[in-house]
Image: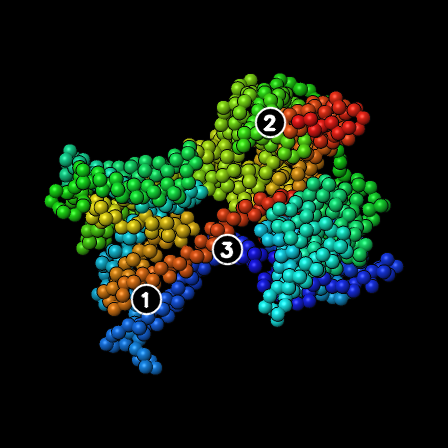
Amino acid sequence: MRDRLAEVLDRLVGASALERVLISVAALFAAVLVGGVLVFVSGGFATCRTGLDLAGWTFCYNPMQVYYELFLGALGHPLEGGWQLTNFGLATTLQRTTLLIFAGLSVAVAFRAGLLNIGTQGQLVVGGLATAVTVVYAAAIVPGGFIGTVVLIPLGVFAGAVVGGFYGAIPGVLKAYGDANEVITTIMLNFVATGVTATILSWQFQDPNSNNPQTRPVPEYAEIPNLPLIGFSGRMDFSLLALAFAVALMIGIAWLFARTSFGYELRTSGLQPEAAAYGGVDERRMTVASMTLSGALGGIGGAFWVLMVHGRWLENVPSLGFDGIAVSVLAGNSPVGVGAAAFLFGVLQSGSRSIGTGTDVPPELVGILSGLIILFVAMPEFFRMLGLRFRPAGTSQPARADGGEGGDVDE
Amino acid sequence: MSDSGAGTTDGTGPKTGVDAGTADRKSTGSDLAVHLDGITKRFPGVVANDDVDLRVERGTVHALLGENGAGKTTLMNVLYGLYEPEEGRVVVDGEDRSFGSPRDAIDAGIGMIHQHFMLVDPMTVAENIALGNEPTKWFGMAVDRERIDREIRDLCDRYGFDVDPDATIEDVSVGVQQRVEILKALFRGAEVLILDEPTAVLTPQEVEGLYEVLEELTDQGKTIIFITHKLEEATHAADAITVLRDGKSVGTVDPGGTSRKELAERMVGREVLLEAESEPAEAGDVVLSADDVTVRDARDIEVVSEIDLDVRAGEILGIAGVDGNGQAELVEAITGLETPDEGTITYDGTDITEWSRRQRIEQGMAYIPEDRHERGLVMPFDLVENGVLGSQRSPRFATSGRIDWPGVRDHTEEIIETYDVRPPDADADAQSLSGGNQQKFIVGREFERDPSLVVATHPTRGVDIGSTEFIHERLLDLRREGVAILLVSSNLEEVQALSDRLAVIYEGEFIDVTTPEDVTEEELGLLMAGQRPDQRDAAGSVGGDDR
């Protein structure tokens, strides 16, 4: 059994990029199949006026229709008449994709450095508040219009990155110099972030014109603008510019990993800290640096959530940071993979909304369908990561530390 | 790889009744247990086995000798059903066989003990032995533990194994684990046992024990094939030796009728110097010195106690000692992976005690670490990426934070070429290389760093003769060029042959500093065991344990 498990892990670890894509696609189909059966059977227990009558049972839900809404609703029903590229469904999908790219990159950077940053959510929350506050106050001294846009947006994003980065650096320092497990500290710091931002908000920055816990709105010219021609002009909460920035950042992180000394050291630390120390990497500094970078990316996510979606900071921050963990795992912590995974999540979240409006299927069941897809698609990647983690440990056993030749041609 | 799972088979316990056949085995001289006839096995880009013949007589120990990458393990994997050969016949007990999987090979009475033990650590010896072959009772409802215990005890009695079936694997020594692997094969009815580099993980005492086990097994009619690249082992333990070179068989010889030198030449394909020749040193200035260096471990126990040493340019200082006497910690303190608790380390006249590892590398310190899997190589990285480890920020390979990958690749390919790393593929992952080739690569990377000081820990561990010779030559070249070398090794021959001065470490202290000429191997062994030089003549008393 153990051998077979090891074999499977080995196989997954050794899978090529194409194989991994194919595995993911196959997993997606399997998830749809299982979910379809589930939807169909659940339909037998629901009550409805019209449904499929079979052997005395009435099956209310049509799995085909549910998946049609899930996948095509997320794109705005491209097979139906009157479809436009800039539709509501697709805008929702891409908005989620954009935000999840930031969150996913945040988790991926930490993970590649061998750190489990569960705290992206907290970093995103504090970063977002910093952005909103900075922009609201800076707007008072910056001229409006085009200059305002050009100054305030970068300033806001920068503020989010700095504060998010600082908030990520805290667990980094605690880990490096106090040997505190980053999983525990980042989880705790998420609660701290929620509490502290709520306190700061009510103390100083609450919007006086509202009863909701939220900051004052940033000026309209400080929201991320749409592109003039192909912009989703009907929607104020998504901008292709933001998506382009997210994709550029994604490529930048990929470049950082592949080409730079820092990226090399980060990957080495993540894969084999002992070898990194041997190669002259200061483990503590690397821990702090990678957590800071991770936090800054989370903070940027918060900044875009503020500047693109709501135009202000709200106390009720959606769980983008936690979804970022799933996105990163699904992507095998590869920056470019994060883009694809974030898009899948965007489709699922936007499509779920479409199912809600287009069918009678209850939202709980839709949640299960999304969950199944994530579970199925992420599992092979998850096991691959397990394999990567545990295989080096296996190879360090004395039995392989010898002059054997087997590895020359096999494996 | 062998156990394919839960398939419990009744009655595949040890086969008895073979004894009848063993009585007359020695009279029938050409009774072949295994005959591999013209085996050819190709892999993309490599011919791993090229028309190899192997005839193994029943009841003998047959050594398969060859360098790293000569195709020994491939050949045995063919016999064990892991690979199917492109050409050739596998004949077992005079019958043509074609094994689709190890299961078929096991059924035909072949057992393989891999280098990497396939044991479940938290389970007991008995459970491990029976795993996958549990005899059952109550119509397959329960495992027949009594029968397992009985059969294991019978096997132990029969072959004189001293193994406690109820001990947990993680609590027993590596030597015992190996015995458990052998028992596992016997339990499944193996008549032919393949051992892949069986001594690599054993202490010298355990190696002696293994030889005894092999003798006992062959006396009882079992046939042993063992894979090795070590001459002494082949000549010491085998009844016949087949030498492989570059995937081809270069003949089978009788160990009695050949010299070690002859064997080595057959194996390497050219003349070899079994001992490196070193001319007297022309030592220059002191490059590295340690003063009163003390290192304590996590439990605050002194593992290195007030050690002083000097290494001069153009000199090799050897440190000999049994593993675990503080040499590892001393080396880490010198190379910057650990901070000494007391004392100072000086390099090129500068106090570097507080320097980071990176500063030391930049200053020209090369380090061949003891643990190549954990430290020396990043296993999932390819060789190009490993080729820059330690130089990732040096101006030679990086400008303004960016790594010059084409430059690194050229450098890596040079190392591969010069140090004969096989397979010669810069894109191969480090973990796919065999231990010896990994070691060659690390040695190459560190030697080509243009160092002024080399700290080499077990530089040739696991490396075959040809490459060992090459590494030794390069070490002497570096010495000639005026590099200071600190050589730590538990291989007595190596430290004696190469060192200009020799320090023996025991329990964190140098108990003697001498020159290789002034001490015999025997005396060195006693020193390493902790017998102080002044007690050496004290009438055979075991004087070393005064601490």
Callout 2: residue from which chain?
B
In front: A245, or A334? A334
| Image point (34%, 39%), residue name | A168
- Front residue (pair B2, B54): B2
Say which residue appears at 31% left-offset and 61% top-offset: A367
Q: Is residue B382 left or right of residue A326?
A: right
Task: Please tell me whether mark 2 or mark 3 is closer to you in this view.
Answer: 2
Q: Image point 25% across, 68% down: which residue?
A: A359
**Of the pair A53 and B178, the residue shown nearer to us:** B178
> Most extreme residue toward the front, as rendered?
B146
Using the rendered image, report if marks 3 and 1 lie on a common chain. Answer: yes
Residue marked by disc 1: A67
Res B304 label? 2
Q: Distance from label 3 to label 1 (Cα)? A: 29 Å
Rendering coords of residue B240 (x, y %): 80, 50
Q: Earlier in the sequence, mark 3 or mark 1?
A: 3
Chain letter of disc 1 in the image: A
In the displayed structure, B114 sits above or below B385; it is below
Subunit bearing disc 3: A
Q: Which residue is mark 3?
A: A12
Q: Residues within 10 Å of mark 1 (few under 14, many from 20)?
A: many
State how far apart marks 2 and 3 are (Cα). Answer: 44 Å
For badge 2, the amino acid type reads Val
x, y (%) of residue B305?
Answer: 60, 24
Q: Is residue B462 above or below residue A237?
A: above
Kindly identify the amino acid type of the residue bearing the numbered disc 3: Leu
